[in-house]
Amino acid sequence: MTVIGAEAVLALAPDASSANAARALVMPARWPVLGANDVAVWGACQGSGSKPYQTQVGITGATPVFRCSCPSRKFPCKHALALLLLRAKQEELFTQTDAPAWVSEWLSTRAEKERKKEEKQRQETATPVDPEVAEQRDLKRQAQRWSRIEGAATELQAWLYDQIGRGLGAIGDEQLAGWHTMAAHMVDAQAAGLALRVREAAQGIRRGTDWPERLLHRLGLLYLLCTAIRRRAELSPEMQAELRTIAGWPYDKSEVL
């Protein structure tokens, strides 16, 4: 069965406070029900109310999907994060068994939605499309993605400025969780290349005596990369293509040919 590592789980947290709240719930006593199979992980987390929160995570796709009966508006919530953290640390607690009804019903509903989505995509593919219409549609999609990446670069630049302003020596465990949160934001914005560079920078924190100098160098290069992305319209097509690759947006075969 797929087991997501603790670091990867924390990278999914919507913010540092959610990551910290999840860590506080990584106690078997808070989870009277735990289970897993090849497609999902689930658990019942005892909160302040009389009825435990039903938490479930689908693990078959490229990224996990979440559902929880708690009222939190954050996604994923602290219960879902805690469930995956507990599994990463104590996998033996999760009995491999048939999923309870509240899990299997959710999985069935998701599977049906995916089936309908795939069917719609097949129908769209089978329908002939005017080349000019297809080109305009592709240009629109590219513009939308660039807009998301540029927004991510703007957010990352402001965050980098704050990190340097606070002082790199002040980075502790709580602040480090914020680095993983920022990396997750970059992934959400389809800027996987920026996320990778944030994670790589975080991995070097407090490693070796010269880590502040190395980190400052990395952050400086990352800041320049963000500046280039935001000002890409001023660059040559060749430089724009290179920026696109660095940002983590690979070209399709059809775009290269």
Image (spheres, rainbow, N blue to C red):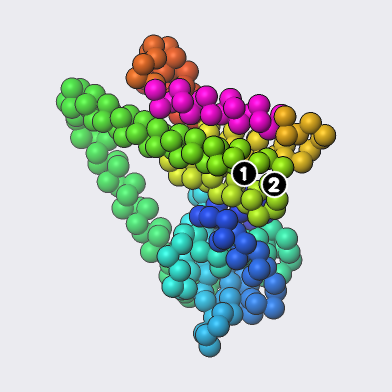
Q: Please identify the residue farthest to the right as the structure is shown.
A: 209
Percent x, y for residue 85?
A: 65, 60
Query: Which residue is depicted at the point 39% across and 14% down?
Result: 235
Q: Looking at the image, which is closer to me, 104 or 238?
A: 238
- What is the secondary structure assignment of the residue under circle 1? helix
Residue 149 in magenta?
no
Residue 170, which numbered label? 2
Q: Can you identify the residue that label 1 sits on? A: 166
Percent x, y for residue 135?
A: 24, 24
Taking the image as drawn, is residue 207 in sight? Answer: yes
Percent x, y for residue 251?
A: 43, 23
Mark 1 residue type? Arg
Q: Report whether 169 appears left or right of 63.
A: right
Query: Which residue is depicted at the point 66% across and 26% down?
Result: 217
Quadrant in the picture for the C terminus = top left
Taking the image as drawn, is residue 94 in sight? Answer: no
Quadrant in the picture for the N terminus = bottom right
Q: Looking at the image, which is closer to me, 79 or 176?
A: 176
Q: Looking at the image, which is closer to me, 225 or 190?
A: 225
Q: Which residues are magenta?
A: 214-231
Query: Which residue is depicted at the point 49% across and 35% down?
Result: 157
Q: CA distance from mark 1 to mark 2?
A: 7 Å
Q: Report whether 63 appears left or right of 125.
A: right
